[in-house]
């Protein structure tokens, strides 16, 4: 055997006792083993290694996320409730279609404005309420689509003002119902408070206070668009930061206060002796309204990303539908299907002794 043949049979020893670490892994020294021995440890969430036998993993930039092999960083996808999304398109279509219903009821009331049922419903306040309900449905459209600066600035403010206008109309109707009944007592001086100027003043003052609160909110700590990566680190959630959580909850708290006052006053006046007592409808509508928004609070806290926005849209539409159904569905039924009930005798019939009482 020649010297060259001997060299071919000699095996050169390797300087490592471990396999090479692939991309997406890093070397980790094994205690008690030679330095040439190591373990391959996968990179942590949000980190990559882009070459073999990497000693360290590198974290991706804030707007990027590793691929499945953790070998390179890719731009993060963005998430928001868009019109292209099935959920967003469904909610937007529902809001648009629902906004037509109060307009149709408004047309029905206009055609029957001289009937006793419509007059007893306080025709002008009912018209304002129906217009505000249509705007309530449309206000939910501000929550669908890309949340840019202008949309973030106005969507919660417009929602608060429109709903305040709506609840203020209901509060004015409630107070006017009580005044109208109490004014029938002999020698009662409340008759001068049953004019349309008083009801419009109630609506104006309630809306003015909410308007001042919203203007203060926008001037001091306005809402703004933000890129949120804390909820789901693998995606960018584009949402609106409310700026001042205190101002936001004060706006909602004021709205709930008006709704609660309307509910309490209507509940106390629900057994007034007229056969047609609108306080009963207001009681049920405010109860449904408050129930929807009380249920919304824990539901919104458990939702994440675009589903949080979807929950608020659902609450806006559900509470608006509660007001439409409880306030106007019975009246529309009598106007359309029971016209014989739409008479002064049936609307204004009282008990025998004509006693006015509030429980």
Image: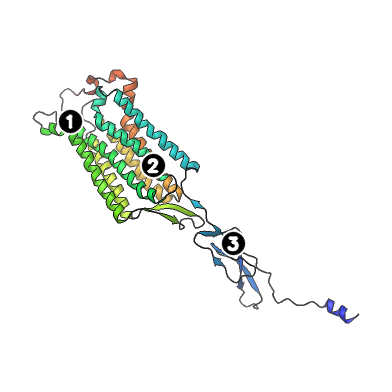
Label 3–label 1 contact, CB within 8 A: no
Horizontal and vertical percent position of residue 82: 47, 45
Q: Nearer the viewer, residue 247 or 226?
A: 226
x 58%, y 70%: residue: 56
Left or right: residue 260 compared with residue 23: left
Horizontal and vertical percent position of residue 14: 73, 76
Q: Say the numbered circle drawn on residue 39.
A: none
Q: Residues within 10 Å of mark 1 (few under 14, many from 20)?
A: some
**Could you tell which of marks 3 and 2 lies nearer the N-terminus?**
3
Q: Which residue lies furthest to the top in this view?
A: 340
x 46%, y 53%: residue: 237
Q: How crowded is mark 3: few (under 14 residues within 10 Å), some or many (20 or more)?
A: some
**Figure quadrant of residue 75:** bottom right
Horizontal and vertical percent position of residue 295: 37, 44
Q: Which residue lies furthest to the bottom in this view?
A: 3
Q: In this view, does 159 lie above or below 102?
A: below
Q: Is residue 330 above or below residue 166?
A: above
Q: Say the numbered circle drawn on residue 72.
A: 3
The residue singled out by tag 1 in the image is: 180
């Amino acid at each position: 055997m020649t010297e060259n043949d001997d060299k071919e049979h000699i095996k050169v020893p390797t300087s490592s006792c471990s396999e090479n670490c692939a991309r997406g892994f890093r070397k980790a020294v094994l205690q008690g083993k030679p330095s040439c021995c190591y373990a391959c440890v996968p990179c942590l969430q949000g980190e990559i290694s882009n070459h073999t036998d990497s000693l360290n993993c590198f974290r991706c930039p804030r707007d990027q996320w590793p691929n499945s092999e953790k070998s390179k960083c890719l731009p993060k996808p963005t998430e928001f409730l868009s019109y292209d999304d099935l959920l967003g398109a469904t909610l937007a279509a529902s809001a648009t279609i629902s906004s037509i219903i109060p307009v149709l009821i408004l047309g029905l009331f206009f055609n029957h404005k001289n009937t006793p049922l419509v007059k007893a419903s306080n025709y002008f306040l009912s018209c304002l309420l129906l217009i505000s309900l249509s705007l309530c449905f449309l206000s939910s459209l501000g929550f669908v689509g890309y949340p840019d600066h202008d949309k973030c600035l106005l969507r919660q403010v417009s929602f608060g003002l429109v709903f305040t206008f709506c609840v203020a109309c209901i509060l004015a109707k409630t107070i006017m119902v009580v005044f109208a009944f109490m004014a029938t007592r002999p020698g009662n001086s409340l008759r001068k408070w049953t004019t349309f100027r008083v009801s419009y003043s109630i609506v104006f003052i309630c809306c003015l206070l909410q308007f001042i609160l919203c203007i203060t909110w926008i001037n001091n700590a306005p809402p703004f668009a933000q890129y949120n990566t804390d909820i789901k680190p693998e995606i960018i959630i584009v949402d609106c930061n409310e700026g001042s959580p205190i101002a936001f909850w004060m706006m909602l708290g004021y709205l709930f206060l008006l709704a609660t006052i309307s509910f309490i006053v209507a509940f106390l006046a629900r057994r007034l002796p007229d056969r047609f007592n609108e306080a009963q409808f207001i009681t049920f509508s405010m109860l449904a309204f408050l129930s929807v928004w009380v249920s919304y609070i824990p539901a919104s806290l458990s939702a994440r990303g675009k589903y949080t926005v979807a929950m608020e849209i659902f609450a806006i539409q559900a509470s608006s539908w509660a007001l439409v159904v409880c306030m106007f569905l019975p009246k529309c039924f009598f106007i359309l299907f029971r016209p014989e009930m739409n008479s002064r005798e049936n609307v204004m019939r009282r008990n025998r002794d004509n006693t006015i009482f509030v429980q």
